[in-house]
Amino acid sequence: MIKPIIKDVLFLNQKSEPATENDKYVVEDLLDTLKANKERCVGMAANMIGVNKRIIVFNAGFMDMIMINPIIIKKSGTYETEEGCLSLSGIRKTTRYHNIEVEFLDVNFKKQRQKYFGEVAQIIQHEIDHCDGILI
Ligand SMILES: [Zn+2]
């Protein structure tokens, strides 16, 4: 189901709780809402649709990716960039890492570990920040 985008900064500043298998329904809502906003948005965290759980989805070029309880376990190579956010207006400066390694559960709750770089790494960092209550 397509959900409205939360813009309440006080809500978005809360740290999300770990997701469990009971939260699987959120993945479908996130994918539907991401698709509905694809002109303006390449990734989304569950709290942006009002669910305070650590789940993110993002577009990785040819497919949409789902990460449950993602954490960045390695990062290297900082750079300055500018980002927008569907929950905020305008563009803001931020610092990101070129290379990251992420540990997460896939949609079947199997543990995965994967390296990312460039634009996809940037989107993941933005969305994991949302899970930690951090806005750009
Ligand atoms: Zn955002």
Image (spheres, rainbow, N blue to C red):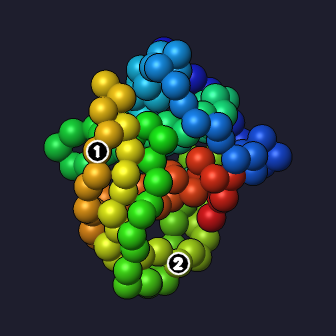
Place of residue 11 in the rendered image (x, y in percent of width and height, measured from the top left): 78, 41
User: Could you say which quadrant of the image residue 57 lies in?
Assistant: top left
Residue 4 appears left or right of 22: right
The secondary structure type at the circle numbered 1 is strand
Decide: is 97 above or below 45.
below
Q: Residues within 10 Å of mark 1 (few under 14, many from 20)?
A: few
- Tag 2 near tag 1, CB within 8 Å: no
Decide: is 94 above or below 88.
below
Q: Which residue is drawn at 42% across and 63% down?
A: 73
- Whether residue 79 can be seen here: yes
Residue 136 appears left or right of 57: right
> Could you say which disc has been placed on residue 112 in the image?
1
Judge by depth and name the residue closer to the eye, 28 or 69. 69
User: Could you say which quadrant of the image residue 91 lies in?
Assistant: bottom right
The secondary structure type at the circle numbered 2 is strand
Place of residue 89 in the rendered image (x, y in percent of width and height, measured from the top left): 66, 56
Q: Which residue is drawn at 37% across and 84% down?
A: 77
Place of residue 63 in the rendered image (x, y in percent of width and height, measured from the top left): 21, 39
Which amino acid type is marked by label 1? Gln
Place of residue 29 in the rendered image (x, y in percent of width and height, measured from the top left): 48, 21
Q: Residue at x 45, y 47 (%)?
A: 70
Which amino acid type is marked by label 2? Thr
- Whether residue 43 can be seen here: no
Q: Extreme front residue here?
A: 111
Q: Which residue is drawn at 30% across and 33% down?
A: 110
> Could you say which disc has been placed on residue 3 in the image?
none
Q: Dot 2 corresponds to which residue? A: 95
Decide: is 107 above or below 77.
above
The residues tagged by marks 2 and 1 sit, at their Cα atoms, a distance apart of 26 Å
Residue 55 appears left or right of 103: right
